[in-house]
Amino acid sequence: MQLIPSLYIVPTPIGNLGDITRRAVEVLGMVDLIAAEDTRHSAILLNHLDIKASLFALHDHNEQQKADVLIAKVKQGLSVALISDAGTPLISDPGYHLVTRCREAGVRVVPLPGPCAAITALSAAGLPTDRFAFEGFLPAKEKARDDKLTELLGETRTLVFYEAPRRLLDTMAAIARLYGERQVVVARELTKTFETIHSLPATDMLTWLGEDDNRCRGEIVLMLAGARPDPDALPPEALRTLALLQKELPLKKAAALTAEIHGVKKNALYKEGLARGLDCSDEE
Ligand code: SAM
């Protein structure tokens, strides 16, 4: 089999070296060049797979600049694979600029499916998976992290974060403070010897993690149940209509018309209008 000159996106194991697809091994064995985040780290995997390849360093700090070199190589007829230290490239890992530039330059990008810590964790968490929001790493600074967590309070999809072990306890304290009894799942060291997947309400999770340092060690995916949708919440479109109509009409009339247009309760709209401080001085 001969490879068509392309950029191949190749996921690698997130712990257990057995978790690599046959196709990934095949492609890594055939490409002319493998772009890797940390070439020394990837050399261990390639050695294990008995693959002798030329490695090319591509990381956050040189990606923009090296993208042109790799694109030129594919255009010359070479095949290039992109791997990261673990899991799927581009998922909280380098590769976004390279892939964007390849697509702009008309270079074929071939994605291979494979391991990803977020998806692996979700598949065993016992939280709804029909819709979820992957948030990557939370900001490192306390205020920015708390702002982000506050912004996500109303998110109804399951939330998935990557978290560094040294920050887990502090982050969990913030989550317990803001989210209270919301269900949290901590998935640690997936596919490895000390794999643990633990589920508790946020406040209990904080206590549980604090009881034993080992519970915060290793690689971690943190998941939160989404907010329960409020059955009485007014649809955002209705609130926009109300605000628009209210500019021209007294609140009572604006609420009645909005209720008719959107099929929601007039009283709820009227109360919302009052709560938002809409002027009702010209009420009839
Ligand atoms: N690209 C990778 C992927 O597809 O999952 C993620 C790379 S990101 C730099 C590394 C983070 O992924 C870790 O800090 C941790 O949050 C998560 N992670 C990676 N491997 C893991 C594992 N075996 N168990 C739990 N989390 C893991």
Image (spheres, helix red, strand yellow):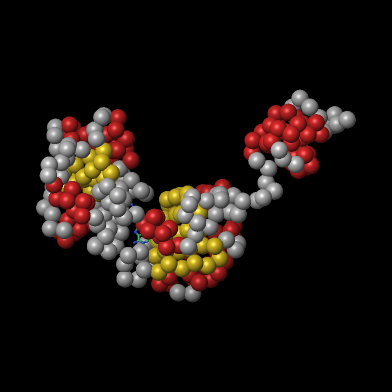
User: From the image, which quarter does the N terminus lie in?
Assistant: top left
User: From the image, which quarter does the C terminus lie in?
Assistant: top right
Q: Is residue 186 positioned above or below 251 on the image?
A: below
Q: Is residue 7 positioned above or below 158 on the image?
A: above
Residue 33 appears in the rendering? yes
Q: Is residue 187 positioned above or below 153 on the image?
A: below
Q: 248 or 65, which lies in front?
A: 248
Q: Residue furthest right?
A: 284
Would residue 84 appear left or right of 165 to someone viewing this image? left
Residue 150 appears in the rendering? no
Where is residue 150? Give x, y as percent. Answer: 57, 50
Q: 231 or 116, which lies in front?
A: 231
Q: 194 or 231, which lies in front?
A: 231
Where is residue 174? Give x, y as percent. Answer: 55, 59
Q: Residue shown at 33%/40% (left/top)? A: 96
Would residue 169 appear left or right of 151 to someone viewing this image? left
Q: Is residue 91 positioned above or below 20 on the image?
A: above
Q: Residue furthest bottom?
A: 211
